[in-house]
Image: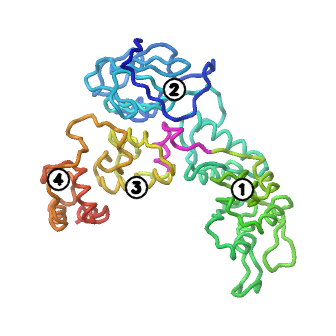
């Protein structure tokens, strides 16, 4: 392939497989495709030039917007070379149109109605590789997480889940409980959300009369989880004076309620989670080293979404399922091609939390329409160069209608924003800007649709 000065280099800030790794393979995730035979597939790419297109000799995709031979790809141990073969609709990588590009792990490629994600895979054969309702995803990182979770569940040790905010620690905890086959319930406690003066009673329980207002005994979360699993979210916020008491429960399986005179034996599997650096807290004297040692004997690290872009829409199906009674049922099908590309390119600093929030709002704005770029927050679409002139997002210079006029138009058009855009001669995104400025939210728009 001619690697001349016109090459675009796309290098996402993602972990790379070490150069020269002879076991490395490149995988192509078909995240979105109008061809149901290929949608959701993961294709192992040969370390040689091959083609992708409607009638390509390499990967054939039944996508009417593709050319017969759309693009040529050539993986090697340090990256993937891509060249658009003068296709009629073009190829986008990293949200930008490209003629040829040097791509890395996690690169997002859009062609026609199809969105692909590249993955550098060390080629490790792992047990427990199939996605589960709690832990979806088909990337190697997803399989590694499921392997670590299954291994942790099999052992009688307590578990520490480590990861950024919103990386799915609660889902991993649920999977550990499910696989452990413990007969008791899974009980959750957000350490950061409990007032310090109530914490000991909340965790260990109390006897009647233990303190003012304690008119009845309380079991506490530890005993509620007997024979099951107790999940302690944000364990780094555990008050210092309670850390020795928790350590005693972990070591001796004994708990004493507040105001009680006897220890009670319990059988509880603790799963603690944190997004804090517990080693730093230990050095600062805010967390006990012996408690950390007891917890982290079985540690599972959760990967952020930006390091597993091919899994993002599968996670969306878990955290915000499409249960509104109408097809499509998967986010990969509900999103337009450009919107899917934008969602995959976004870094999601709060991971599943921000993903759920953005898509929930977009779904409300779209109503019965496909979710497009115009329904997504502005910070999601900055990286995406749209393919068609009519989809331009440049703000119009047209005069903003008064709120009363907008509500009247919404009433006449039964909440159909695209009809307002046609009436005012602007793009739908401009209408949404007007509605936001006027304080007309998704619930009010939905009310006009229902009326």
Q: Position of residue 2 (x, y in %)?
A: 40, 12
Residue at numbered disc 1 = 281
Residue 33 seen in this snapshot:
yes
Label 4 CA crowd tier, 10 Å (few <14, some 14–19, many 20+): some
Indicate left or right for 252 with 154 as reference. Answer: right
Classified by dominant secondary structure, the portion drawn in magenta counts as helix
Residue at numbered disc 2 = 27
Indicate left or right for 379 with 448 as reference. Answer: right
Tag 1–tag 4 contact (CB < 8 Å):
no
Residue at numbered disc 4 = 419
Q: Which callout, 2 or 4, points at the residue further toward the start of the chain?
A: 2
Report the span colored magenta.
Answer: 302-318
Q: Position of residue 242 (x, y in %)?
A: 77, 68
Q: Position of residue 46 (x, y in %)?
A: 51, 17
Q: Nearer the viewer, mark 3 or mark 1?
A: 1
**Element at badge 1?**
helix
Q: Which callout, 3 or 1, points at the residue further toward the start of the chain?
A: 1
Indicate left or right for 297 with 236 as reference. Answer: right
Give the CA separation, mark 3 to mark 1: 36 Å
Give the CA separation, mark 1 to mark 4: 56 Å
Residue at numbered disc 3 = 360
Tag 3–tag 4 contact (CB < 8 Å):
no
Q: Which callout, 1 or 4, points at the residue further toward the start of the chain?
A: 1
Q: Position of residue 238 (x, y in %)?
A: 71, 64
The image's mark for residue 361 is none
Give the CA separation, mark 2 to mark 3: 30 Å
Give the CA separation, mark 2 to mark 1: 39 Å
Q: Which callout, 3 or 4, points at the residue further toward the start of the chain?
A: 3
């Amino acid at each position: 392939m001619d690697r001349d000065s016109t090459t675009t280099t796309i290098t996402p800030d993602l972990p790379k497989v070490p150069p020269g790794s002879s076991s490395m393979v490149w995988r192509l995730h078909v995240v979105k495709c109008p061809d149901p035979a290929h949608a959701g597939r993961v294709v192992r790419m040969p370390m040689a030039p091959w083609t992708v297109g409607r009638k390509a000799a390499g990967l054939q995709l039944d996508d009417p917007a593709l050319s017969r031979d759309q693009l040529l790809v050539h993986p090697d141990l340090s990256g993937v070379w891509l060249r658009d073969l003068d296709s009629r609709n073009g190829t986008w990588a990293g949200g930008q149109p490209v003629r040829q590009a040097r791509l890395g792990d996690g690169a997002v490629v859009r062609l026609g109605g199809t969105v692909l994600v590249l993955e550098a895979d060390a080629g490790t054969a792992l047990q427990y590789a199939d996605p589960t309702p709690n832990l979806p995803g088909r990337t190697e990182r997803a399989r590694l997480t499921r392997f670590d979770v299954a291994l942790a569940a099999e052992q009688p040790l307590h578990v520490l889940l480590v990861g950024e905010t919103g990386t799915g620690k609660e889902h991993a905890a649920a999977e550990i409980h499910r696989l452990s086959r413990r007969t008791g319930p899974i009980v959750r406690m957000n350490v950061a959300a409990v007032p310090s003066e109530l914490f000991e009673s909340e965790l260990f329980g109390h006897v009647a009369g233990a303190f003012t207002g304690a008119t009845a005994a309380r079991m506490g979360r530890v005993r509620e989880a007997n024979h099951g699993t107790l999940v302690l979210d944000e364990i780094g916020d555990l008050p210092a004076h309670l850390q020795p008491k928790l350590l005693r429960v972990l070591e001796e399986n004994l708990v004493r309620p507040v105001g009680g005179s006897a220890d009670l034996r319990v059988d509880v599997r603790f799963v603690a989670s944190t997004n804090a650096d517990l080693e730093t807290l230990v050095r600062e004297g805010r967390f006990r080293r012996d408690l950390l040692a007891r917890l982290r004997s079985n540690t599972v690290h959760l990967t952020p979404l930006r390091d597993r872009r091919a899994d993002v829409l599968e996670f969306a199906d878990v955290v915000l399922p499409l249960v509104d009674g109408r097809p499509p049922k998967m986010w990969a099908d509900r999103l337009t091609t450009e919107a899917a590309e934008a969602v995959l390119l976004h870094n999601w600093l709060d991971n599943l939390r921000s993903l759920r929030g953005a898509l929930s709002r977009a779904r409300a704005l779209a109503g019965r329409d496909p979710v497009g770029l115009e329904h997504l927050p502005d910070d999601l679409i900055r990286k995406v160069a749209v393919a068609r002139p009519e989809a331009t997002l440049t703000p119009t210079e047209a005069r903003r209608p008064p709120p009363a006029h907008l509500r009247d138009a919404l009433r006449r058009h039964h909440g159909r924003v695209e009809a307002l855009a046609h009436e005012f001669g602007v793009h739908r995104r401009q209408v949404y800007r007007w509605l936001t400025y006027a304080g007309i939210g998704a619930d009010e728009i939905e009310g006009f649709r229902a009326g």
